[in-house]
Each structure stands twice: as structure tokens, then as C-alpha cells.
Amino acid sequence: MPGRNIVKNYGAEQYYHIYSRGVAKQLVFRDDQDYRYLLSLFKRYLSIKPTTHKSHSNYPNFSKRLELIAYCLMPNHLHMLILQHDEYAMAKLMHTLLVSYCIYFNKKYERVGPVFQSRYKASLINERSYLEHISRYIHLNPSDWQNYPYSSLPYYKQELQAEWLKLGYVMTMFNNVGDYIKFLEDYESRKAYLEAIKKYLANC
């Protein structure tokens, strides 16, 4: 039976938390190159300027159809927080993203078959105030979250910049970067907040 909070009907101008796990809970990122390749796919498909394939045709571009707000790549799964502007954008991006990564991964490791489970999970975030909490949930996934290089947190800390990542949806809720980091460090209230937003999160 599908999880109760898997969204089946996607809407325009809506926020979603996306979750995708490796098939059979296997590793989908085995080394630094794997993480960086997935990040390069974010840049390829979400940059304002379309990226050109070696055949001189453009890759699909979703920059006007969908915005990536936060992400975290873990060894056997990934999280994304997005705002989609049309009802088909998320499904098409995720298909393109995961298929592209699967081709890379299978070629590198000389394997066949799917890399991710056949169906990603997406939860509708229908209250904008929950964006800050879900961004925290995503950023706190790694145990060493302060120094983890494969999440969007370094961009929130202004250590890195990328025009394909849209931080404003979360950062406008805080006075400055320090306030956001303090919000992440608020461990005592972390569990309470996660319980409060449990119904909004993908069935992880």
C-alpha cells in the first residue's frame, strides 16, 4: 500500500519535499565523484542558461518551471525541497535527473538495472511557514551536518554560491545567516519540530 503522504496529484505553485532511496537500500553514492556528478545534474537542468550537449543540442531546462530550495545527498538516498511552477515540472525533472544519474552510475560501476527505487516520494508543503522547518530537517540529515559537503547548507552559510539554488524562500524568514545557523543548532526543540511536521514529510 502506498504511504499515506505520497502526493499523487501535483499542483502548480506548490512546495514539495522529495525523497528518493537507492534500490534495496543500496548505496547510490560511493565516492566523491558520484556526489559531484549528481550536483552537476542540478546545474545542468536548473541553471538559467540551458546547457548544451556534445551533440550541440540543449539538455532539458527546468529553471522556469521549478526551483530547488534545499537538498541533501546521503549515501543511500537524497532529499530535495522544491517549488514547482507547473504541475508536470517535478515529475519530468525527477525522471530526467534519476535516469541521467542511473546511466552514469551503471556505466561507471559496470552494472545494469535501476539505481533508485522506481518511485520517488513527494510530500506537499501547503503552509509556507513549514519551509524553514523542512529545510532544517534536510540539512540536519548528516551526523556531521556542520561540515557536510553534499547538502545545500554551505550555500546557506554563504560559503558557496549557485544561481540554480534558490535560498530566498527560506532565508527571508530569518534576519541573517547567523540566525538560520542558530535555528539549526537548536537541538532541544528539534524532535518536537519534526513531530509537528511529520505529516508533511515524505514517508522516509
Image (spheres, rainbow, N blue to C red):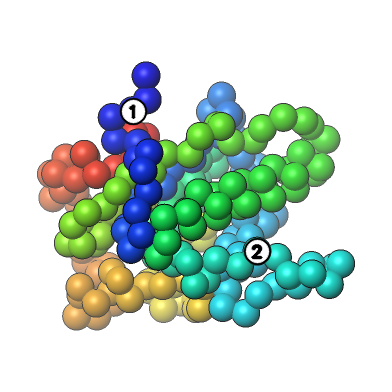
CB-based contact (under 8 Å), mark 1 and mark 2: no
Q: Is residue 78 above or below residue 129?
A: above
Q: Which residue is mark 1?
A: 3
Q: Is residue 64 above or below residue 9?
A: below
Nearer-N-terminus badge (1/2): 1
Q: Position of residue 72 (x, y in %)?
A: 45, 53
Q: Which residue is mark 2?
A: 60
Look at the image and tell me in which quarter the C terminus lies: top left
Q: Position of residue 49 (x, y in %)?
A: 62, 79
Classify mark 1: helix, strand or loop.
loop
Q: Residue at x 16, y 40 (%)?
A: 195
Left or right for 123, reference 119: left
- For the residue carrying disc 2, how many other residues have a C-alpha within 10 Å: few (<14), some (14-19), or many (20+)? some
Q: Is residue 179 above or below residue 30?
A: below
- For the residue carrying disc 1, how many other residues have a C-alpha within 10 Å: few (<14), some (14-19), or many (20+)? few
Q: Residue at x 79, y 32 (%)?
A: 111
Q: Residue at x 41, y 55 (%)?
A: 87
Q: Position of residue 132 (x, y in %)?
A: 24, 62
Q: Amino acid at mark 2?
A: Pro
Q: Which mark is residue 84?
A: none
Q: Nearer the viewer, residue 52 or 42?
A: 52
Count of marks, rendered view: 2
Look at the image and tell me in which quarter the N terminus lies: top left
Residue 202 visible: yes
